[in-house]
Image (spheres, grey):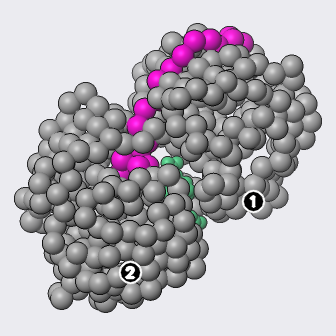
Amino acid sequence: MDYLEIEGGNKLSGTVDIAGAKNAALPILALTILCQNEVKICNLPPVFDIKTMLSLLENLGATYTYQDDCATVDASTVHNTEAKYDIVRKMRASILTLGPLLTRFGHCEVSLPGGCAIGQRPIDLHLKALEQMGAHIEIKQGYVVASAPDGLKGTTIIFDKITVTGSENIIMAAALAKGETKIINAAKEPEVVQLCEILNDHGVLIKGIGSDELIIHGRDRTLLNIPEITVIPDRIEAGTYLCAGAITNSQITLNKVNHSHLISTILKLQEMGFDFDLHEESITIKPSAKILHANIATTEYPGFPTDMQAQFMALALQADGTSIIEERLFENRFMHVSELTRMGAVIQLNNNIATVEGNHSLNGADVMATDLRASSALVLAALVANGTTRVHRIYHLDRGYVSLEKKLQQLGAKIKRLKE
Ligand code: EPZ
């Protein structure tokens, strides 16, 4: 297994390009199941989860080519409707094949995603919505066994909780259903918006795109024809690099970003004393005289993203006072706290609220990555820690960040990837 070795104390400078959004690319890849033709998808981030989704599609009978940042997927040949455990266990977003397989074939067997480090992450809302659309759902030997022999029927769905992949699953299911589906309390993340825009541009009439109420006119199992898609930039990767600039108090520029997707992150950094230059597709963060403490509560888009919570906790350790961070979406998304504490951080946990003391210098240590975003928080802390930090189990990072160490090296960080 690889690990990252980081010498703290270096200022950063220069520019990095931001990759395509993993969390937009995954539903887009699942969307190919609804298509009668091959689909060229560009600006794909070459991260592990994308490769996992491509191998799942291949296992279902699709074919694909993958070169540079584009994959051409032909799912018209899909004949197998079983998403197997040994693939799904590697990536819970495999559940995004449930809606497309069921609405196209009238039946499918998708392994339950199983547990996850950051929380139980059930899929009850996905299943309840599909049942309301006429599906018969059973759980058998760890699989969701779904059937709708006459196809899915449009209806009104009210999500008890806002769910990103739940919304995406039902949007795709509704695209080939009979009649109109109204989704109330839908997720509004940019990744959900892009999925709706693609469908709306290719024959699936959707009203309310960008709002929490969507009306989708199904095509009664007539497959789609989508020639080409370009994935939106990754707002969480961008936010992570803004935090790298902030925590080292450096001026750096990110290219290929959509800063309208980053507003809550930018506003929070402004509250902490940082200023920005915004251009068409780039953003420059400028150093601050001092890092001000700030309180954070994670919530659904356009609020402060849970996927940025760990990164901001690392930054808050450098602030001029105490910051309160409340994690409202997941029940166990503070696993970076114990590792940061080993680097000298002083953080009090009380259920889903972390009290983070600033003005503490950090010391390099051996630390363990536990989940994707927690891992990036450890790297950020290591950039300003005294001495050497080694971040182990960085396969978590490789699931969602394209060549993190190379991009940080490019910015002047002293970081290298080594073998255990
Ligand atoms: C998506 O996960 C993202 N993953 C996550 O990013 C992100 O943290 C999360 O949305 C929240 O923004 C992808 O898009 C692939 P949810 P998802 O369903 O859809 C509860 C990363 O770092 N819930 O919006 O699985 C759930 O337990 C990953 O890239 C139910 O109770 O999240 C959670 O408390 C991590 N029942 C809340 O809703 C359900 O059926 C939000 O979960 C579904 C969800």
What secondary structure is marked by label 1?
A: loop
Read off the magenta span.
8-26
Q: CA distance from mark 2 to mark 1?
A: 35 Å
Q: Residue 352 bears which disc, if any?
A: 1
Residue 188's place in the image compared with 19, above or below, is below
Between disc 2 and disc 1, whose residue precedes?
2
Q: Which residue occupies 18% across, 48% down?
A: 227
Residue 170's place in the image compared with 413, above or below, is below
Q: Which residue occupies 36% across, 47% down?
A: 25
Q: Is residue 18 magenta?
A: yes
Q: Nearer the viewer, mark 2 or mark 1?
A: 2
* Residue 253 relative to residue 208: left or right: right
Residue 321's image quarter? top right
Q: Which residue occupies 33% across, 62% down?
A: 200
Q: Circle 2 is placed at which residue position?
A: 181
Q: Quadrant of the N terminus?
A: top left
Q: Which residue occupies 23% across, 69% down?
A: 101
Q: Is residue 118 magenta?
A: no
* Residue 392 relative to residue 295: left or right: left
Residue 81's image quarter? bottom left
Residue 282 percent across, percent down from the top left: 55, 26
